[in-house]
Image (cartoon, rainbow, N blue to C red):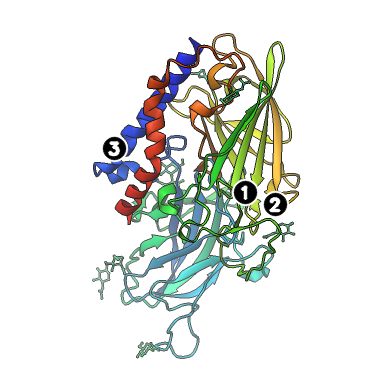
Amino acid sequence: MAHFRLVLDETSMGSSLQIFFLLCLLGSLSLCYGYDPLDPNGNVTIKWDIMQSNGDTYDVRVSVFNFQLFRHVEKPGWRLSWDWVNDEVIWNMWGAQATQQGNCSRFKGQRPHSCEKSPVIVDLLPGTPYNTQVANCCKGGVLSSFNQDPSKHGSMFQMNVGGATNSTSFTIAENFTLGLDGYTCGNAQSVPASQFTADGGRRWTQAISTWNVTCIYSQFRASPNPKCCVSLSAFYNNTIVPCPKCSCRCQGLSGAECLRPGEVLQMPHDPTDHPPALVRCTNHMCPIRVHWHVKQSYQAYWRVKITITNFNVIRNYSEWNLVVQHPNLRSLTEVYSFTYQPLYVHGYVNNTGMFWGIKSFNDLLLQSGESGNVQTEMLLRKEPSDFTFREGWAFPRKISFNGDDCVMPQPDDYPRLPNAAMAHDHRILNLPLSIIITLLPLINHFLELFLR
Ligand SMILES: *[C@@H]1O[C@H](CO)[C@@H](O)[C@H](O)[C@H]1NC(C)=O
Ligand SMILES: *[C@@H]1O[C@H](CO)[C@@H](O)[C@H](O)[C@H]1NC(C)=O
Ligand SMILES: *[C@@H]1O[C@H](CO)[C@@H](O)[C@H](O)[C@H]1NC(C)=O
Ligand SMILES: *[C@@H]1O[C@H](CO)[C@@H](O)[C@H](O)[C@H]1NC(C)=O
Ligand SMILES: *[C@@H]1O[C@H](CO)[C@@H](O)[C@H](O)[C@H]1NC(C)=O
Ligand SMILES: *[C@@H]1O[C@H](CO)[C@@H](O)[C@H](O)[C@H]1NC(C)=O
Ligand SMILES: *[C@@H]1O[C@H](CO)[C@@H](O)[C@H](O)[C@H]1NC(C)=O
Ligand SMILES: *[C@@H]1O[C@H](CO)[C@@H](O)[C@H](O)[C@H]1NC(C)=O
């Protein structure tokens, strides 16, 4: 009975996935690009507030807000860019800076901060001199996920713009990009003017006009290869089910390099760039492995241990997070050494939650090595309505690390209870899921081609 429930669950999960991909392939690209069922409204919004006009120049306040529940922006951070429509130049900037001054030869005397047609703006680092700052600025381009630290999910800078042939009309720039893998930004939309509070809320001022630009993330756009995989074990079976072979890449295939035991790392390090992953050689070749161990059973509770291991030798993951789907999460009783927050997602019946590290204790997942892992244990209450150790029910339905889905082992391979007498007549039912899982990489590649 319990078994059938599981299989049906997974099959229906699988087929909704399938329908989803089908819709993508049938050409409704807007449906598939960037859609994450666990964070359907997730986006990064760029807000462009025209604050005041000074005759031939005007002031713009630009804010970047991360409205994604569990995806964050890590070092080296955003590199915001746009195309000016007229001949605008940036006279001055506070809280951020343009990477290039560009050709300002048409100006005599004082030269603008940047005359680039498509300026690239980078955030200032924390602790830059006070006179170059504005409120809520200077975070090195790093934005926390909305759930993890709402106070750090936004950043702001201000600039003085001039030089446009027609400075009485504020033409909004075009073609915004965040300079982050996987994000695409839409067109600027005119929205109701922002209001700002001054004098402790006793006075409100208002922007002259406001535009919003919405940017959406797509895992497929960011990388065709997964970045994480799941391995499983249980106290009732001494088989450790490893991550599927070639979960992320295959050793030796198309330049997939890895660090063999004993090999020494030599790396030219450019701090302004995300170093590409260099992983230790494994069968799965993933930078991140999540291990789910069903550790113990008590009368009314059961205990799970989760270990996240970093196989990337050149990268620390700051403010990492894990999103887990399991039906028993609704009865989660205790979580040790991680922070936990349920995700209330429409259509998912309280079976999804988010874990992340405790500040200055384990919120930094160190590069591969002796301390390159973090772990937690949790206690879940057995609900008589559905609890069972049978047929893999105790294993997670889905796991993502930093918002990217992890590759799961095939349900057929899950550690089995010793007496698995009834575990054989349902392979046919399992088939669709297996097929879908087998086909996923193919579908991935197809999508990649489509999205180029
Ligand atoms: C962006 O996210 C915010 C917060 O979840 C939401 O209110 C807004 O509607 C989203 N924008 C779009 C265009 O989806
Ligand atoms: C924005 O990008 C499009 C397509 O690349 C281009 O045709 C257009 O000129 C760009 N806009 C500006 C203001 O440069
Ligand atoms: C700089 O711009 C001026 C026109 O404003 C142009 O004559 C000159 O060739 C440009 N210089 C370079 C190096 O592009
Ligand atoms: C400047 O823009 C305003 C408003 O769009 C327009 O009415 C005016 O004709 C423009 N002036 C020039 C010189 O293009
Ligand atoms: C524009 O963005 C701001 C935050 O960046 C948000 O609060 C506001 O709701 C957005 N407006 C619209 C109409 O989406
Ligand atoms: C990771 O963090 C540790 C401790 O802060 C530091 O010593 C190490 O250099 C960092 N590694 C990388 C690749 O940034
Ligand atoms: C999910 O949990 C919330 C808060 O505990 C509760 O109000 C809601 O009824 C639950 N929904 C379902 C479908 O169980
Ligand atoms: C443990 O699980 C594996 C994988 O499902 C299975 O092949 C094996 O028979 C199980 N061991 C026992 C003792 O049941």
Disc sitting over residue 200 in the figure: 1
Left or right of residue 142, residue 436 in this image = left
Residue at the spot of label 2: 366
Please tell me which residue is depicted at 59% across the width and 37% down the height of the picture.
Answer: 242
Whether residue 110 sits left or right of residue 431 in the image: it is right
Secondary structure beneath dot 2 equals: loop
Q: Amino acid at mark 1?
A: Gly
Q: Compare marks 3 and 2 and give the one earlier in the sequence.
A: 3
Residue 387 in the image: x percent, y percent?
Answer: 58, 14
Q: Quadrant of residue 117?
A: bottom left
Can you tell me whether the CB of the residue at mark 2 lies under 8 Å from the nearest atom of ligand 6?
yes
Q: Name the element at disc 1.
A: helix
Q: In the picture shown, does residue 270 fall above or below 344?
A: below
Left or right: where 414 falls relative to 103: right
Give me the disc on residue 22: 3
- Classify mark 3: helix, strand or loop: helix
Q: Position of residue 414 (x, y in %)?
A: 55, 27
Q: How far apart are the alpha carbons under marks 3 and 2?
A: 39 Å
Q: Specify the amino acid type for callout 2.
A: Leu
